[in-house]
Image (cartoon, helix red, strand yellow):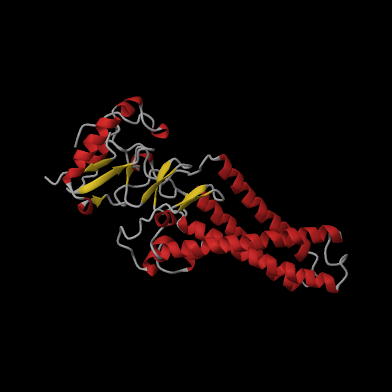
Amino acid sequence: MKSPVHRCRDPEHGRGEHGRGDHGRAESRQESRAGYLQAEQRIPISKDIITSSSASAMWFIRDACGIVCAVITWMLVLYAEFVVVFVMLLPSKNLTYSLINGVVFNSLAFLALASHFRAMCTDPGAVPKGNATKEYIESLQLKPGQVVYKCPKCCSIKPDRAHHCSVCKRCIRKMDHHCPWVNNCVGENNQKYFVLFTMYIALISLHSLTMVVFHFLYCFEDDWTKCSSFSPPATVILLILLCFEALLFLIFTSVMFGTQVHSICTDETGIERLKGETGKWDKVPCWEAMQAACGGPFSLSWCSPFSGLRCERRPLEVLEEIPQGEIIEEDIIEIPLY
């Protein structure tokens, strides 16, 4: 392995001036280095070797568009909560109907918001940034014939099935896509919470849509002034807006839920399908992939956004220390066979 060259002074801002000047020489050295193995003989580095850099830290993406979309999501859920409780349930004369639907709707809404929070604030599987150093590669103790790929954008050692996200500015393991509604990437560690979020939003959308239909029928049969604590025009406007919101999000989240479950069962992320990278790894069976994504054998914890939640933090001395050193120049590093 060649001695490192300072190519990427700041992982956030790409190559340094010295790296740009030596671009031609780097390409020739990279081509000669690629002669160690044929393409079909190369063994990519496993994603299990590269660990997440923020396993115990709070994860939050400071993206203006994503933050606005996340706030809008919460406001829409709270609007549905307001209309369901204060327009439809509280004025109802049937106490049993109000209690049952109130408990069901509020429970689903709480789980939806909790799932959204976990999907937004959970590290999706970010690769440690700026660890593409000679010292770090040597510390991995790789076998001869293995290939190490460096991301030229964040200067990280890229494990198998990792992709760079331009919004998060990190390489994400098993990245499916970046979702602005949760202000985060959907990756290996938070896909379960994103699936739960889409499922619970679809359920509360269906539930509220059903209640709106029954409430309209009730109001048509009875006096409009008695079926709501608001004026008839205000009641109609609130119900129509809720009906439009519920129908729109029911369709959207149902489609997203189906695509995510399909991605898990086929062991193939959305970005891998988009780039045509299918068939380059050993796929696991559907049920085994579901267990891996949901955190274990089938149980009620699959439907809980609180499973795996821990309050304690790992001590600093336990956190993995990345060996310091200069960023290597090559984008593909092959461990020699000798």
Q: Can you give x and y, in whole percent of width and height, for residue 265 in the image?
A: 41, 66
Q: 249 left or right of 222?
A: left
Q: Nearer the viewer, residue 99 or 171?
A: 171
Residue 98 position in % (x across, y down): 73, 69
Give the side of residue 287 with respect to residue 302, left or right: left
Image-based side of 293 in relation to 77, left or right:
left
Residue drawn at point x = 51 percent, y = 52 percent: 119
Residue 206 image offset from top left, x and y in percent: 64, 67
Q: Residue at x 44, y 50 (%)?
A: 124
Quarter occupied by residue 297: bottom left
Picture residue at 39% right of the left edge, 69% below the top: 287
Residue at the left extreme of this rendering: 338
Res 186 visible: yes
Task: Tell me if residue 306 can be seen.
Answer: no
Report the quarter where the N terminus lies. Answer: top left
Percent x, y of residue 307: 47, 59
